[in-house]
Image (tube, rainbow, N blue to C red):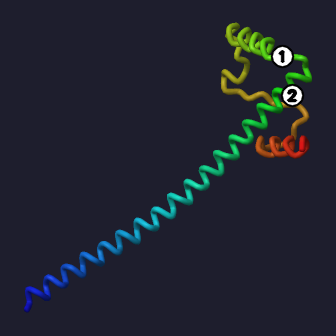
Amino acid sequence: MRILQGRAKQLRNAVYRQRRIRSSNEKNNAVAQNRRDRFEALLSEMKSDLDFLKERLKEELNELGIDQPKAQKILSDYYQSGNNGPEANGVKRKVEGDECKSSRRKINDRFHSVQ
């Protein structure tokens, strides 16, 4: 009789441990899914920002009368000269007349002004 009671207690403990592990795994899974969803949303936003910036750059180059081969020549000449400007030394250029503190706000302002 005692053997059966001991075995039943062992089985109850095993079931209890499995429930705890399952509960923990479900919580971890929910957190991971939430993190994945946020990451995917951020990635999607970054992709759309990149596409917008590429399109805006293309428009600005067209306004300046610079076609693709000319732009490639300008860039290759710049990098071949070894003159990478202040950015190469870790110094960022200050854009005059631009009071926005956040690049995200600048992008959003430009994006909404185009639409």
Q: Quadrant of residue 8?
A: bottom left
**x and y percentages locating residue 26 in the rendered image:** 44, 67
Q: Secondary structure at mark 1?
A: loop
Q: Secondary structure at mark 2?
A: helix
Residue matched to label 1: 67
Residue at screen point 59% across, 55% down? 37
Residue type highlighted by circle 1? Asp
**x and y percentages locating residue 35 in the rendered image:** 55, 56
**x and y percentages locating residue 73 in the rendered image:** 76, 10
For the N terminus, give its image quadrant.
Answer: bottom left
Image check: 23 left or right of 49?
Answer: left
Residue type highlighted by circle 2? Glu
Residue at screen point 81% across, 46% down? 105
Image check: 26 left or right of 48?
Answer: left
Query: Rounded to the nearest whole Å, what is the CA distance between mark 1 and mark 2?
Result: 10 Å
Image check: 21 left or right of 97?
Answer: left
Q: Residues within 10 Å of mark 1 (few under 14, many from 20)?
A: few
Residue matched to label 2: 59
Residue at screen point 73% across, 12% down? 78
- In this rendering, the answer to whether 13 lies above or below 99 is below
Residue at screen point 70% across, 7% down? 81
Q: Quadrant of residue 25?
A: bottom left
- In this rendering, the answer to whether 28 lies above or below 89 is below
For the C terminus, give its image quadrant.
Answer: top right
